[in-house]
Amino acid sequence: MHKRPLSPHLQIYKMPMTAGLMSITHRMTGVFLVLGTLALSYWLMAIAAGVNAYLQAQQLLASVPGLVLLFLWSVALFYHFCNGIRHLFWDTGAGFDLKQGQISGYFVLFMTIFLTCLTWGIAFLGT
Amino acid sequence: MHTPDLRSPIARVHSLGSARSGTEVFVAQRLTAIALIPLIIWFMVSILSLVGADYETVVAWIRAPWVTVFLILLMLILFYHALLGLKEVIQDYVHHEILKTITIVSMQFFVITIALASVLAILRIALGGI
């Protein structure tokens, strides 16, 4: 189990931001989104429990910490969503050279910001 | 033809080398990801249209047959995708073997329980006399 030969680890390589940082961010947003999904479960359970529990849940989500978490979850969701699609393209073998990887990386960042702004713009106009 | 095993007997006892499984996990992670693309778009558009809605409107939305179906699908596939992802993260970062096993098993018990509770909540709203 010990002293097996290992390939050079991550610290050895110098990677552009669109590779290393965006890769670990994909994992971190994924883990963070599980918490968001738990909030969604709580919301559904509150609806099932009746109108009072629902109003309590709505109040909790509309509080300042609730809104901050919802905002962060929306950012994490759009990032993980767009970067996940980027990964699916990679799985087909497409988009692997340096230039394409950087373009798709910046596109993911742009779409994350765009979709977050769009969502919250619509949400605030709707209320 | 007989393929020589390059591992020593002690290495085989320690389960080193290929586990001869894992591809199905890779495929399942991608399939759930693909399924989640339309489900997430549908869910986000729906939630945005429900901003500021009262209780009756939200319940009526969940009770629509296709909404019930898609919500249950969303929760099941989302939690399955989450379970696979969390498992991978734990396997990569928790190095203590016993602790790793305990963490993975507890995580899976927890995720499956919450997934079932979510589906039950949806069914209670859809079928129950709220």
Image (tube, coloured by chain):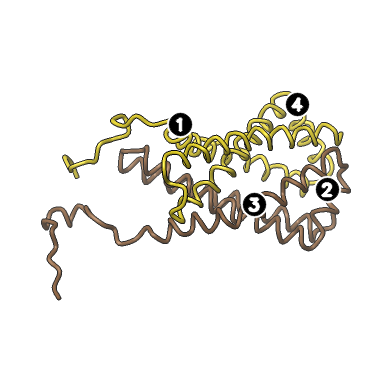
Q: Which mark is residue B117?
A: 3
Q: Residue beneath label 1, please?
A: A21
Classify mark 3: residues with Cα within 10 Å, few (<14), some (14-19) or many (20+). Answer: some
Q: Where residue B41 sits: x, y (%)? A: 69, 49
Classify mark 4: residues with Cα within 10 Å, few (<14), some (14-19) or many (20+). Answer: few
What secondary structure is marked by label 1?
Answer: helix
- In the foreground, A4 or A50: A4
- Amino acid bearing label 1: Leu
Display colour for chain A = yellow
Q: CA distance from mark 4 to mark 2?
A: 20 Å
Q: CA distance from mark 1 to mark 2?
A: 39 Å
Mark 1 vs mark 2: tell me if same chain. no
Q: CA distance from mark 1 to mark 3?
A: 35 Å
Query: Between disc 1 and disc 4, whose residue precedes?
Result: 1
Q: Residue beneath label 2, please?
A: B58
Using the image, name the chain to which the residue with label 3 belongs.
Answer: B
Q: Residue beneath label 4, please?
A: A63
Q: CA distance from mark 1 to mark 4?
A: 32 Å
Point 69% across, 25% down: residue: A65
**For this view, does B81 lie left or right of residue B24?**
right
Location of residue B69 with respect to B111 vertically, above or below: below
